[in-house]
Image (tube, rainbow, N blue to C red):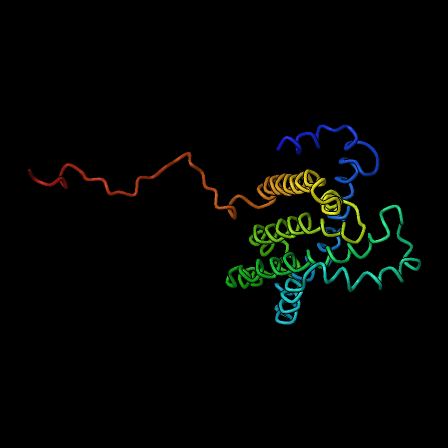
Amino acid sequence: MAGIIDFFLDPTHWTGQPGIPNRMFEHLVISGLAILIATLIGLPLGLYIGHTGRGANLAINLANIGRAVPSYAVLVIILPVSLSLAPVLGYSPSLGLNFLPILIAMTLLAIPPILVNAYAGLRSVDRDLIEAARGMGLREGQILRGVEMPIASSIIVGGFRTATLQVIATATIGAILSGGGLGRFIIDGLAQGQVGRDSIYAGAIMVTVLAVGVDLVLSRVQRRLVPRGVRGEHSTSRRVDPRPRLSGSDAPAP
């Protein structure tokens, strides 16, 4: 325990490229970009499938297959392809030679929960409400934005939270391919053997704290985005006693 505290108190661990601030920034960049791209792909697709019901079986099965494939296997498969395409794509080498395969792997990891939750959220909406909205003359886009999405917002945001936590936790494996991020402390510590034990624990602690902190922030964002009625909150200003009240004439005789 003392060694872990000394690790965080060491000023050399807070400066330069291998320092904690820079590694934290790299971890946030790769995680944030992966979530952004996954949201741009998975959310519209999930909303479309959930609203229309078209292609649901194919999309859900592909998403489940994506969940079953280990992220490290995806990294190994994508690495040679992405490196050969690097000159064509022209991505910045300052983010690391293996930045692109790590980004692709994390994006593929984040798409399934976002897509599945968006689909499940919309399909959970009462069909009678949708038919009533159509009967009032609302267009399909208006029904999606004004009826389905507000009711399903809790499930949709829940998928976003799940994807974010998975990416933050799994992005550590990018260090295996000489990537950056907080996983660098864990991989470097493993390479050092017994001497690097404190680095391993410190890296694991930082990833855990980052994941918990981001989840707390997202939980507050969820409470603000999700309508109050959908959250299940009710006013407590008036409480009604469900027990029947007995009048004088109804009171039992002694």
Position of residue 234 relative to residue 145, above or below, is: above
**Which residue occupies 60% across, 57% down?**
117
Task: Pick the residue in front: 188 or 217.
Answer: 188
Q: Quadrant of residue 39?
A: bottom right
**Which residue occupies 72% across, 59% down?**
72
Q: Is residue 95 left or right of residue 5?
A: right
Residue 182 in view of the camera: no
Residue 96 in view of the camera: yes
Q: Quadrant of the N terminus?
A: top right
Q: Is residue 156 left or right of residue 128?
A: right
Residue 194 position within the rendered picture, expressed as x and y whole percent measured from the top left: 69, 42
Task: Pick the residue in front: 9 or 89.
Answer: 9
Q: Is residue 170 left or right of residue 125?
A: right
Residue 60 position within the rendered picture, expressed as x and y whole percent measured from the top left: 62, 67
Task: Pick the residue in front: 160 or 150.
Answer: 160
Position of residue 239 relative to residue 117, above or below, is: above
Residue 215 position within the rendered picture, expressed as x and y whole percent measured from the top left: 61, 43
Q: Total label count?
A: 0
Q: Quadrant of the C terminus?
A: top left
**Which residue occupies 66% across, 30% down?**
5
Position of residue 102 relative to residue 221, above or below, is: below
Which residue in the rendered view is the most extreme toward the front? Answer: 194
Residue 219 position within the rendered picture, expressed as x and y whole percent measured from the top left: 59, 42
Which residue in the rendered view is the most extreme toward the right? Answer: 87
